Amino acid sequence: MYKTNQHTLFMGKNIVFVPECPSTNDLAMSLLQQPAMIEGTVVITNCQTAGRGQRGNTWITEPGQNLTFSVVLKPTSVSVKNQFYLTMATALAVYDYLTGKTDKPVYIKWPNDVLVEDKKICGILIESIVQGNVLKGAVAGIGLNINQKEFSISTATSLKNVTGLEFDLPHELNSVLALLEKRYLQLKQSDFSGLHSDYLNTMYRIHQLHLFKSHDESLEGSITGIDETGRLLILCKGGMRSFGVKEITFQ
Ligand code: BTN
């Protein structure tokens, strides 16, 4: 049912569909080890039995209802210090896709959750292989909630819940992939400032006073952006502070 993308240069030209697998990221990572594997190869499944999320979390999704896939990438011109731009490019592609589907505001919650109506509609897990100071390869894993109606957590939603419509998964996959290719080419062309400013424009709760938790410390401050390595910048009472992914949570 998933077909080669006719609207891209390389993204989704090769599609590997497996009815069930533990994690598409794991499968894509093993394909990435094969030197002949073409960039833009997509591994997609109907049912992930051991889906992985950020910070060691699991990713659970109703079989056959959502887009659960990973893309094989070779961002060899991207240096390790710029690797957060791959996260930005991927999240922005999902943002671009969703803003074309709904008039409701879409936000990227740092580092790469995509939210609509304050609920998570998409999670992204990027894993990369470093060689020297560049990215030899990467897998961009995307869990995008499309037709699922009920969620075990109240903080999750889907495109169906947001729009009231039912979507054709293969068609939607090809739309996301076309937008991912655009953003990925922006990265390959080293348009870092373009990605950075687009990311800032979509950032959840930017410039709003909010409560955060860092380890055991509660803190109040407002997000002002991210630094050049992707650390979150928060203006707190004591001044500007920066945080890595495992160092801060929204309250
Ligand atoms: C998160 O928000 O914690 C990230 C979730 C990422 C889930 C996707 S689903 C496809 C790919 N395969 C995985 O095992 N994880 C990612």
Image (cartoon, helix red, strand yellow):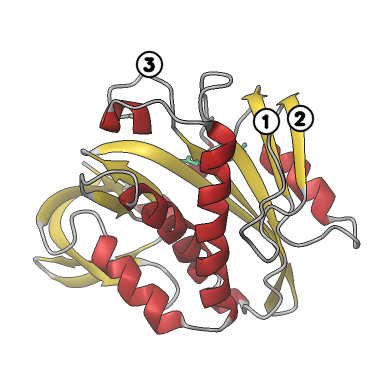
Pointer 2 with pointer 1, Cβ within 8 A: yes
Badge 1 or badge 3: first in the primary sequence: 1
145 to the left or right of 226:
right
* For residue 42, above or below residue 77: above
Label 3: which secondary element: loop
Of the residues under marks 2 and 3, which one precedes in the sequence?
2
Question: What distance separates the C-alpha of mark 2 from that of mark 3?
Answer: 25 Å
Q: Quadrant of ligand 1?
A: top right
Q: Position of residue 12 (x, y in %)?
A: 68, 52
Q: Provide residue 109's location: percent of width, then percent of height.
A: 31, 51
The N terminus, quarter of image: top right
Cα–Cα gap, marks 1 and 3: 21 Å
**Would residue 152 appear left or right of 30 to someone viewing this image?**
left
Q: Is tag 2's residue or tag 1's residue first in the polypeptide sequence?
A: 2
Q: Which numbered circle lies on residue 21?
A: none
> Would you say the beta carbon of the disc 1 residue lies within 8 angstroms of ligand 1?
no
Report the residue marked by disc 1.
45
Where in the figure is residue 127, as x and y percent of width and height? 63, 54
Viewer can see residue 227: no
Residue beneath the point at 31% across and 76% down: 197
